[in-house]
Image: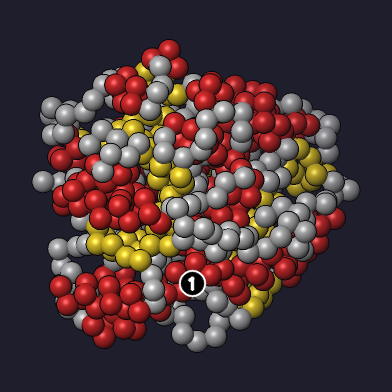
Amino acid sequence: MTDIEIARNTKLEKIEEVAKKIGIDEEDIELYGKYKAKISNEVYNKNKEKKNGKLILVTAISPTPLGEGKTTISIAIADGLRKIGKNSILALREPSLGPVFGIKGGATGGGRVQVAPMEDINLHFTGDIHAITAANNLLSSMIDNHIYFGNELGFEKVVWKRCMDLNDRQLRKVETGLSGEKKIVPREDGFNITVASEIMAILCLTENLQDLKEKLGNIIVGFNKKNKPIYARDLKANGAMAVLLKDAIKPNLVQTLEHTPAIIHGGPFANIAHGCNSIIATRMALKLSDYVVTEAGFGADLGAEKFLDIKCRKAGLKPDAVVIVATIKAIKYHGGVEKEKIQEENIEGLEKGIANLYRHIENIKDKFGLNVIVALNKYTSDTEKEINWLKEKLNEKDVESSIVEGWEKGADGSVDIANKLVKLVERKEEFKFIYEDSDSIEDKIYKVVTKIYGAKGVIYSDEAKEQIKQIENLEYKNLPVCIAKTQYSFSDDPKNLRCDNEYDIHVRSVELKSGAGFIVVLAGKIMTMPGLPKVPAAESIDIDENGNIVGIF
C-alpha cells in the first residue's frame, strides 16, 4: 500500500482523547474537525512550574534529493518510546506546499510511521502558512499604499518581498505597478516562498502574542534617502499583521498512526531559513512529557547548526541527545555511486561516502559537545553485508548506532533505538555554541564555515561586504547568522558531494532580519524562491470521484 492508503486505513483516535494523554483539558483545545486541534497557549502557563522533559533532536547526513527519512525516524522514535512505556511527544514543523507539489513530497513520515491526517497536514492543515502569507502580503500592500499617498516616510528603497507557498521561479524578480494609473510608482519586486519569509521565522522564534507584535514591528521594510531604516512599526502595520496571526501562533495537535501525540507548528526551510518548529511548541511539549522528539531540517550542517546556534541560543534550550539519520543509499550517493546503481551492493561506494557521515558526527559530538547516536533508516535494498559494514565502522569510532525499521514495522521497528536513547539522554554533555554573540559578523560566518562545513575560508562579493558594514552601522552585529546554502553538500556547490579537496564558501549577499533577530547569509546559488522540477509531483496528484486524494507521498 502507498503511504496515503496506509494512513487512510488506520483508525485514528478523536483528538480530545489524544489531548488527554498529555494532560490537556478539552477547554484548552479548539477543534478543527475530528482529528486536528489548536492548543491554547495558556496550557504552557498552567504547566510552566513542571520540570522539563528530555529533548531529543533528530538531524541527518547530507541528503539525497528525495531525503533520508528524517521525519519518518522522528515519528518512529516517538512511537518507540511510547511502546516501551515512556511518555513521549513529537514536535515537528508543518509541511510546505512547495515540496509537496515539487520534488521532495510531503513531510508527514511514511509507511507505518506517519502523522495523521496526512492529507490535511500536507495541504492546508489549520491555515497557519496561509495566515503567514496574508500577513506578509498585507505588509507589502501597506508599503506600496504609503508610497502611493505621498511617501511621507521617504522610501528610497524597498527591501520587503511578497510571498506565496508554492515553487514558482518566475516570481523571483518581477516589476510591479505597471497599470499606468496616476501616482502609482512602478518598481522592481520579488517573491519568496512563504516558508522563507521573515514572518515565518518570527512566528517560530516568538514567545507570546505581545512578543510577536514587537518582532513584527521590528521588521526593516526599506530605507530612506539618508539610508536610514524604515520599520513595519513606522507604517503601523504590526498590529493588523498580528491579528492575522492570532490563531497561527497557537500550536497544532495531531497524532501518529500509533496515537502518539504530535505537536506540529511552524515550517521554516533549513537551507534558506532556520529550519525548526516553534519555540512555543517545543517549550509546551517539554512541560507535557518526559521525552520530546523534534527535528531540524536537512543535513546537520544546516538544520542542526541553526537549531543549536539560533533556536537554542534564543530559547535557552539544549538537546539531551542528537540522532543523526543515515541511509546506505545516501552514503553511497556521497561516495559518487550513480543513481541508477545506488540500490546495488557496493562496499567501495560506502567507503568513499562515509566521510560525510563522520563529519556530521564529529560536528555534533566534538564541536557542539552533545550526545550522539546514528539511526540507520533501513531500506529493503540494503544488504546484510552493507549494514554490518556500517555498524562496524561506527563501532570503531565509538559511536552508538541502531537499525530502525519503523517504516515497515511501526513502533516495533524502533524499540532498540528508544531503549538506547533512554540511556543516552542521561549522559553528561558539554554543550557549546560555535560562535559568541560578541563575535563580529565575519567571524561568526568564518567559524561556521571552517568548523562545521570544513571549508578553507570565505569569499565575499562586494555587495556582501557593503551589506555587512551597513548591518554593523545599524548596531545589529550581535545577532546570530543563518547561512543559506545548498543542502546536498558541505560546500556551496550541490555537485561537490565528497568535498575531499579544499574549497571556499562564496557569500553573495547578506540580509538583516531584524524582526526575527538573525542575519541571513546567502551562499552559492541558493534561491529563496525554489522552482519546480521538470516532472513535478503535482502531475501525479489527483482526487477521485469519491473525493479521495491520490498521489501525495
**In terms of secondary structure, where does tag 1 sit?**
helix
> Can residue 465 be seen at all in this image of the molecule?
yes
Indicate the position of residue 186 as horizontal and vertical percent values.
Answer: 67, 42
Vertical order, 529 against 249 (above or below) = below
The image quadrant that residue 289 belongs to is top left
- Foreground pick, 274 / 403: 403
| Colour mapping | secondary structure
- Foreground pick, 216 / 456: 456
Label 1: few (<14), some (14–19) or many (≥20) C-alpha neighbours in 10 Å: some
Indicate the position of residue 507 as horizontal and vertical percent values.
Answer: 64, 68
Vertical order, 334 against 480 (above or below) = below
The residue to which callout 1 is attached is 362
The answer to whether 56 appears left or right of 66 in the picture is: right
Please tell me which residue is depicted at 22% across the width and 72% down the height of the picture: 387
Please tell me which residue is depicted at 57% across the width and 46% down the height of the picture: 317
Identity, as a three-letter code, of the amino acid under mark 1:
Glu
> Can residue 166 be seen at all in this image of the molecule?
no
Please tell me which residue is depicted at 17% across the width and 77% down the height of the picture: 385
Indicate the position of residue 427 as horizontal and vertical percent values.
Answer: 47, 57
Badge count = 1
Vertical order, 349 against 462 (above or below) = below
Indicate the position of residue 20 as horizontal and vertical percent values.
Answer: 34, 22
The answer to whether 382 appears left or right of 283 in the picture is: left
Please tell me which residue is depicted at 48% across the width and 72% down the height of the picture: 362
